[in-house]
Amino acid sequence: MRLRAYIVRRLFMLPVIMFGVSLIIFAIMQCFTPAQRAVAYVQSREEMLNINEIIKRYHLDEPPIIQYLYWINSILHGNLGYSISANMPVSQALMTYFPATLELVFLAIPLTLILGITFGILAAVYRDSLIDHIVRFFSISAWSLPTFWSAIVLLAFFYGVLGMFPPGRLSPQIFLSLSISGFKKYTGMYIIDGILNGRLDVSLDALNHVILPSLNLAILSSALPMRIMRSSMLEVLGKEYITAARAKGLSKWMVIWKHAVKNAFIPMITVAGIMIANLITGVVITETVFDYPGLGRFAAGAATSLDMAGILGFALFASTVYAVMNLIVDILYALIDPRIKY
């Protein structure tokens, strides 16, 4: 019952957090002129020619509280403005580019967690050994590497030298065949939609294109969970209950997997939640280098084109992702550690 009450309280906090985020974004918007703010309400290219009408319709020349109410009402009705960089409404642009990023992240997250958790545990268990030194050297190096540098190196070696894992999202001939064959987009993710359409060639081609950017993200992102898992495991392995479990005659790996890993994993939940949110909203450089048409490249294009509606739409989307991931982390905390709900 206490767990249910805790979850309900956290759910009620989500609208409050989003309200605070909307106030911050709205306050930043006040730095611009009414004509510049009006772009966030435009829904088509034709309306761009009637900015004065938009200003009057949404009361952008009235007190901020009136403007805020009209802005929130517009957002709740799905109107995030018109993106001049994507040449479509922002809401449509987010729905168009998000599946590509999701497909990329779905492959990168398991790779990141497997690398980070596995090598973090091994480094802690074999502390000060060769494997520990290698893991620490790798984590520090990976954390320090610029994202664009590692992406260029991977692209130059695998695609430039070996001719494997080309950039982009699909090969030109595969992309052309989709419009001819009446390919249906169920999820927007070509790996899944290829299977649902009975087109394994599309799925394999999409997988071939997504492997390299996912690997780049996994290599760099695994550095943080690797260090966190190592530190957390070292702390847990020094606890008295671990010593007691060993004194009972339990095998080394039984003690590690049954008693140590579960308790050491709690800090990893926070790291994993933030990391997933970062991957969903912050893959700008990776998507740009690999010419991958996801949310990151859309955000970069909006920023370089001074596309205010696109930037605001992406900011709202990113803040929502972080708020939801924090909520999920809090609930997982309560499920794993019973002390949280008290």
Image (tube, rainbow, N blue to C red):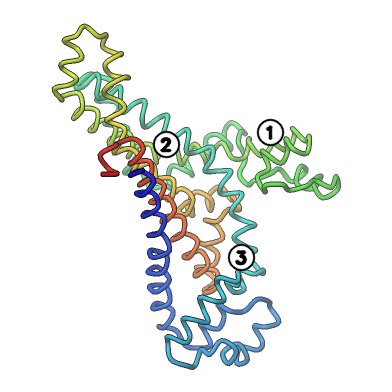
Residue 201, image quadrant: top right
Residue type marked 2: Ile
| Residue at the image point whose x is 85% and y is 45% from the top | 181
| Residue at the image point whose x is 27% and y is 21% from the top | 259
User: In this view, which residue lies farthest toward the front?
Assistant: 1
Residue 118, image quadrant: top left
- Relative to 10, is 192 above or below? above
Choose between 339 and 186: the one closer to the eye: 339
> Disc 2 versus disc 1: distance between alpha carbons?
22 Å
Residue at the disc numbered 1? 204
Residue at the disc numbered 3? 91
Residue 145 is left or right of residue 110, and the answer is left
Residue 248: x %, y % from top left:
19, 9
| Residue at the image point whose x is 62% and y is 58% from the top | 95
Residue type marked 1: Leu
Decide which of tag 2 and tag 3 comes sooner along the chain: 3
Q: Which mark is residue 219?
A: 2
Q: Secondary structure at mark 1?
A: helix
Residue type marked 3: Ser
Q: Secondary structure at mark 3?
A: helix
| Residue at the image point whose x is 19% and y is 12% from the top | 246
Structural crowding at the residue carrying mark 1, measured as other residues with C-alpha within 10 Å and reported as few (<14), some (14–19) or many (≥20): some
Residue 76: x %, y % from top left:
56, 70
